[in-house]
Image (spheres, rainbow, N blue to C red):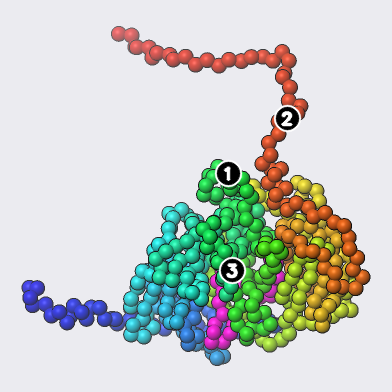
Amino acid sequence: MASAVDRSDIFSLLEPGEPQWPRLLETSITMGTGEPYAVDDIPIPFDNPWKALMFCGGHDFLPDGRALVCTIQGDVWLVDGFLEGGSTEKWKRFAAGLNHALGLVVHEGAIYVLGRDQITRLYDHNNDGEADHYECFSNAYETSDAGHDFICGLQRDQEGNFYTASGNQGLLKISADGAEVQVLANGFRNPDGLGLTPEGIVTVPCSEGEWTPASMICAVNAHSSLNGETEFFGYKNPKHKNLKVLKDGEPPSLPLVYLPRGLDNSAGGQAYIDSDRWGPLQGEMLHFSYGTGSHFLLLRDEVEGQFQGAVVPLKGEFLSGAHRGRFNPADGQLYVSGMGGWGNYTLQDGSFQRVRYTGKPVVLPKRFHAFQNGILIEFTEPIDPELAEQTRSHFVQCWNYRYSAAYGSPEYSPSHFGTRGHDVLEIKSSHVLAQNKLLFLEIPELQPVNQLHLQMHVNEATSAPEDGLSMFLTVHKLDEPFDKFPGYEPVEKTIAAHPILLDLALSTKKEPNPWEQPVPNALRIELRTERISRMKPAA
């Protein structure tokens, strides 16, 4: 009878219960040997009692440095033991039953997991290493039943707002209370994550395909987007279903940087380098390749308000498609998680790895700026003037892409429209400046191009052909000529139209055939259709 029920028993049901997954799974860390950065493997317990699949979708760190790793299958795992020289780490299942968990943020101990249906906040009230309260923090965004409309990556800004990349809606800003969603930009093809800088620049990757000529990284200023305008980057125009490139007669917004197919065929997310214990790169960004399981230094430039960027390949490979990276505040090192599931060139279904700074000198480009007469590059360490000032130590080539309904784009010569190939540009002079940390390559023929490839040899470590430093730049705009080098001579130069404007103008322009004429004595053929009644069978 109801009157016989002890109410204290009912309320006891609200208290955390016994752990569902008390078992700890141990694996042994494999330390990397690379320099100046080594990639350590923190093995995943693929063979676990629950037969749980381990396709890692994101991670973050608790205040004490322990990691939380989520999987697309809907689990969250608590990882411990990898700090302070530990050789054995412990994995504990922390939560389960989530929907396509592809992003995770920890803020002041609060755990937020991104799902296809909602952002779930997890609580561990009794501190037993297992979530006992799952709360819907926000379900204000839209989802989709389409096969590839995933919602990927989760970032949080200093005001508490969340950001994610939706294959259905685009770049989303979610209010700090989870109640409101604003679409900052759209037109992204299969965006697998995002990145966020302290000043509010949000980066979103796209993977090559129809109306996305190459994999690329887009950049949106979250603050300037508050005026209500939504940037469009070229894929699946929501207003013009039959005209997927042009929006209201305008070309799409330009990406921060294009990524050649051989470099990254399926782009992952980005990470801001906020650590002062990871070498001399603090304040820059990293990009992760899902397709190739690799990572890149991501550099940003701006000319007349137009974002443009460059990627620098970094040494070290990952065991699965890399798409999430974060720095652990406990040790200041980079941790990268990844997964299989979509096509890539990696070995494992999932991975969780550390990129550890060894303390050796780091010689990498740190900043660049594009001028009408060349490229200025700042390095993290002094370079060798004797080697770097020889023009034969460097190589420059460029090419463009084409927006179309085809899957990706060939690489086209900028100087011969419609012809496949690259243009090799002359380096007129090379100058080492500012305590040997700046390199200016004088390139008189430089014009706006989709892809500019620099191969540079700047010191003994990069003198061999296979060890040269590579930069892959996207140059949308050129600043006034750089004149702070010996022997500068002004040159009259006409800046060509941006390649995307020329390409779209020619590819969408329709002209009548000037040789079209009536055909004399043409035969006229008429087709007639008549209704034939079905004949009744004879009696």
**Residue 9 sits above or below residue 309 on the image:** below
Q: Residues within 10 Å of mark 3 (few under 14, many from 20)?
A: some
User: Comparing marks 2 and 3, which lies closer to the viewer?
Assistant: 3
| Residue found 59% across the figure and 59% down from its top | 206
Placement of the N terminus among the 4 image quadrants = bottom left
- 404 above or below 107? above
Of 370 and 229, which appears nearest the observer?
Answer: 229
User: How far separated are the C-alphas under marks 2 and 3?
Assistant: 47 Å
* Disc on the earlier residue, 2 or 3: 3
Judge whether residue 93 is colored magenta: no
Q: Which residue is mark 1?
A: 243
Q: Earlier in the sequence, mark 2 or mark 1?
A: 1
Residue 201 got which mark? 3
Q: Residue at x 86, y 61 (%)?
A: 444
Element type at marker 3?
A: strand
Is residue 257 something that shows in the picture?
Answer: no
User: SS of the residue at dot 1?
Assistant: loop
In the rendered image, residue 24, in percent from the top left (x then y), is placed at 42, 83
Q: Specify the farthest residue to the front.
A: 227
Q: Amino acid at mark 1?
A: Leu
Which residues lie in the magenta part?
Answer: 308-333
Give the quadrant of residue 13.
Answer: bottom left
The residue singled out by tag 2 in the image is 513
Q: Which amino acid lies under the numbered mark 2 shown in the image of this protein?
A: Asn
Residue at 55% x, 62% y is 225
Q: CA distance from mark 3 to mark 1?
A: 29 Å
